[in-house]
Image (tube, rainbow, N blue to C red):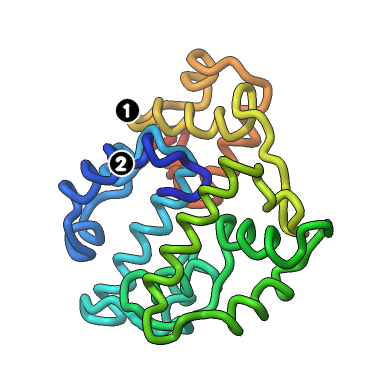
């Protein structure tokens, strides 16, 4: 939920979400429509779908026991190396090595201050060399807090990272249209003509096609819906 979404927006949604889906079993047995409704307001609905599918995998493949190993975690939908490392570290206190924006900020500030296009590989080598392997969770928590402080005091140095890409404006974007389509379809199934009457946008056809291809929206005959 916190990926590219500010903490004040996430906190109430997190409490609501955990209240409705307190464990993997509850989430796995919910409908996608229920999950997306609970997620509404956070954006990036693919994350909610990935989380829902991950809960199903935990139930089916690991009998309800959440995997601890990074390689197993990376088998879950939407989980890459850095997310797997973060989950293993924060949830299970395993000394895994990963990079995210606050970690980048700290290491760029101290080791690459006058450089640009710093590769994650260079940062990962330093994270590996300095990680507190006895208390990795606390160590990464400290990096997160320090990175937040640096962003507030000296600016977002993660801009010097090779991976940095400025996020495009949300207003008028395809992301905004995707979210609007999902909100309308959560109310009730509609045909594309009915959607076009509510959402006047020349990109509707292609965005609706993308959502259907991704499995966020189902098409039955002329009707589009979320189940």
Rendering quarter of residue 15: top left
Q: Please tell me whether residue 55 is drawn above or below residue 64 in the rendered image.
A: above
Q: Nearer the viewer, mark 2 or mark 1?
A: 2
Q: Residue at x 61, y 60 (%)?
A: 106
Instruction: Give how far apart the Cα atoms at labels 2 and 1 are.
Output: 28 Å
**Along the line of sight, which residue is nearer the eye, 218 or 168?**
168
Q: Residue at x 32, y 27 (%)?
A: 188
Along the line of sight, the residue nearer the viewer: 54 or 109: 109
Q: Mark 1 and mark 2 in contact (Cβ < 8 Å)?
A: no
Horizontal and vertical percent position of residue 53: 37, 62
Say which quadrant the C terminus sits in: top left
Which residue position holds label 1? 188
Identify the residue at horizontal 30%, vertical 46% (top origin). Answer: 35
Q: Which quadrant of the figure has residue 88?
A: bottom left
Q: Is residue 89 above or below residue 219?
A: below
- SS label for mark 1: loop
Where does the image place residue 44, in percent across and percent down from the top left? 49, 43
Query: Which SS class for mark 2?
Result: helix
Judge left or right: residue 154 versus residue 136.
right
* Residue that numbered label 2 is attached to: 11
Q: Which label is found at residue 101?
A: none
User: How many residues crowd mark 1 within 10 Å: few (<14), some (14–19), many (20+)?
Assistant: few
Would residue 101 be found to the left or right of residue 194 on screen? right
75, 92: nearer the viewer: 92
| Depth check, front residue: 190 or 210 | 210
Residue 174, picture quadrant:
top right
- Which callout, 2 or 1, points at the residue further toward the start of the chain? 2
Rendering coords of residue 127 (x, y %): 59, 76
């Amino acid at each position: 939920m916190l990926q590219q979404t500010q903490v004040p927006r996430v906190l109430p949604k997190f409490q609501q979400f955990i209240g409705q889906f307190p464990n993997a079993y509850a989430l796995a047995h919910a409908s996608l429509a229920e999950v997306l409704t609970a997620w509404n307001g956070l954006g990036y609905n693919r994350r909610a779908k990935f989380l829902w599918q991950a809960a199903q995998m935990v139930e089916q493949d690991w009998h309800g026991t959440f995997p601890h190993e990074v390689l197993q975690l990376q088998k879950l939908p939407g989980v890459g190396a850095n997310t797997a490392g973060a989950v293993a570290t924060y949830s299970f206190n395993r000394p895994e090595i990963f990079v995210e924006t606050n970690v980048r900020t700290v290491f760029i500030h101290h080791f690459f201050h006058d450089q640009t296009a710093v590769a994650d590989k260079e940062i990962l080598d330093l994270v590996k060399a300095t990680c507190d392997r006895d208390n990795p969770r606390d160590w990464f928590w400290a990096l997160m807090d320090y990175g937040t402080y640096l962003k507030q005091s000296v600016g977002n140095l993660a801009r010097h990272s090779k991976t940095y890409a400025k996020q495009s404006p949300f207003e008028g974007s395809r992301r905004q249209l995707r979210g609007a389509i999902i909100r309308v379809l959560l109310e009730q199934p509609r045909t594309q003509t009915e959607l076009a009457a509510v959402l006047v946008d020349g990109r509707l056809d292609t965005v609706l096609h993308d959502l259907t291809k991704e499995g966020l929206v189902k098409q039955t005959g002329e009707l589009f819906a979320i189940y």
